[in-house]
Image (spheres, grey):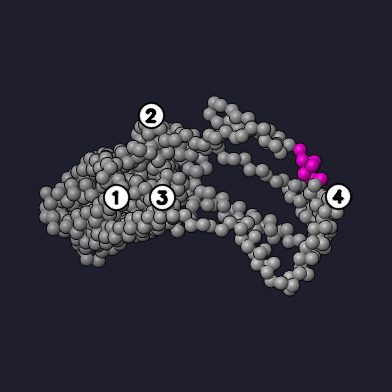
Amino acid sequence: MLWLQLRGRTAGTDPAPSHFVFQGSSAALATRSPSPAMPPLANAGRAPGPPDGGWGWAVVCGAFVSIGFAYAFPKGLAIFFKEIQDFFGTSYSEVAWVSSIMLATTYGAGPISSILVNRYGSRPVVIFGGLLCGIGMVSAAFCTSILQLYICVGFITGFGLALNLQPSVIIIGKYFLKRRPIANGLAMAGSPVMLCTLAPLNQFLFDNFGWRGSFLILGAILLHCCVAGALFRPIGAATTPVKPQVTGKGKDALKEEVTEDAMEMGSPTKVPMEDKVEEEGGKACCEKINQYLDFSLFKHRGFLIYLIGNVLMFLGFFAPIVFLAPYAKHIGIDEYSAAFLLSILAIVDMIARPTTGIIANSKWVRPQIQYFFSFSIAFNGTCHLLCPLASGYMGLVIYAIFFGLAFGMVCAMLFETLMDLVGAARFTSAVGLVTIAECCTILLGPPIGGTLIDTFGDYKYMFIKCGAVMVLAGAFLFIMNYYNYRMLAKEEKERKAKEENPKPVRTENEGRNSWNKETTRDGPELEPLSKEQEGLKEEVNGINEV
């Protein structure tokens, strides 16, 4: 009976309706029928490759502005820390939470930003982030407590900066492939340029308008992120195949048919279809989450090494630059000279980033770029360890020069090394997962440094702590990347050996045939089963003749 029903359904199947698929200015007609009349196009639904130029350079300019504000703005606010501390009567560690919360929100909101980019694209996300930044800083101008500053500057402005950072990094990977290290280096150079501009600008604004008036003006300046986001023209996404959807009515009909067939075949009348539907719903939910965030990256050896090393590194990455200007004021240097230290750091950083991108793109360094990245982190930590030896303003200038060089080297390769490990296809998810893991140490780094300053009354312990942590992170990455490269070479060697000496693999049919031969040798014990099989075959043949 079941066989007759299936035969009737197959014979009465109507061809599915036609669908038009539009991409760009061309339209492709795809007709689905039981017997396809023509083969599908080979390039249908395939996304265009990275242009490596053209409008991509305009995108780099937009990313230059967005990334510059995202990285430089939390550091530039350090100019106001001493005055805000005196205004609210807070300690070093309490005022350091302003930058820490902003940086942690910028990094911790990475997965949300990645999901929004996958759903809506980079352009609208960056424009919305620019609006949030402006709203947060304008609101901060009217704050009456340090807690309100945490909310307005830390959370609202930080979340707006997160919506600027992730889409800018992601869209560069879509526009560039061969020239990607150079493009990343140029875009990352926006951070030192903005820091070089914001440091003296913030001091000028404070002297003329106070910290409240300065926050109002900075809120207006941050609206330029909206203009930068307008340059992020979509490059063209691949068309996703249309999945056949089953309506509620179709599901009910399917349940009734399966139940009827089960009754005719003598199976129990109650079929657990609801459990199956619930299981399918749970799987669909997990697949939808994995569509935006690829959690299988936690099984990727190189990704885990990068993640652990970076989480450790960020514990001492931002604290020295946050406390550099307050440290200079603490030892008796005037305000403008203290702010100029950040400008010196930013100028060297600005030169170091594109230069590092060019070096990293060379044929000698790019295959071993992970080692170069590890060296940059260890070099950064060494600068902090030597900072307490600097005496006077000239010593801090020398420290700022070497710190700017090391800082630029790390930032220029921060995302390039991640893309080198996971590839462009999984980069969006990787950035989101890395940033949310890094936000914990970013949040704790400056407050721990502020606590050391409050406890010992000296800045040198903060610099020593940051330097030791970064040297440890660089050593860890160097050793584990060496191990990773060895394992990759070994796996590649084994793969080539298998290709050169392929072993005979038993197919499923061969296995069934060998099993049938073994069962025929078992003697008369299995004869009743074989006779029942022959009887079933005769009954089926009789039904076919009818």
* Mark sitting earlier along the chain (4/3): 3
**CA distance for labels 2 and 3:** 26 Å
Q: Amino acid at mark 3?
A: Val
Q: Element at badge 1?
A: helix
Image location of residue 541, percent across then percent down: 82, 53
Residue 368 tag number: 1
**CA distance for labels 1 and 4:** 71 Å
- How many other residues sit within 10 Å of disc 2, few (<14), some (14-19) or many (≥20)? few
Mark whose residue sits in front, 4 or 3: 4
Image location of residue 303, percent across then percent down: 39, 55
**Which residue carries the number 3 mark?**
422
Mark whose residue sits in front, 2 or 3: 3
Seen from the viewer's position, the closer of residues 421 and 163 is 421
Q: At x 60% / y 32%, what residue is drawn?
A: 21
Residue 545 tag number: 4
Residue 430 visible from this viewpoint: yes
**CA distance for labels 4 and 3:** 59 Å
**Which residue carries the number 2 mark?**
54
Residue 419 tag number: none
The magenta span reads: 8-14
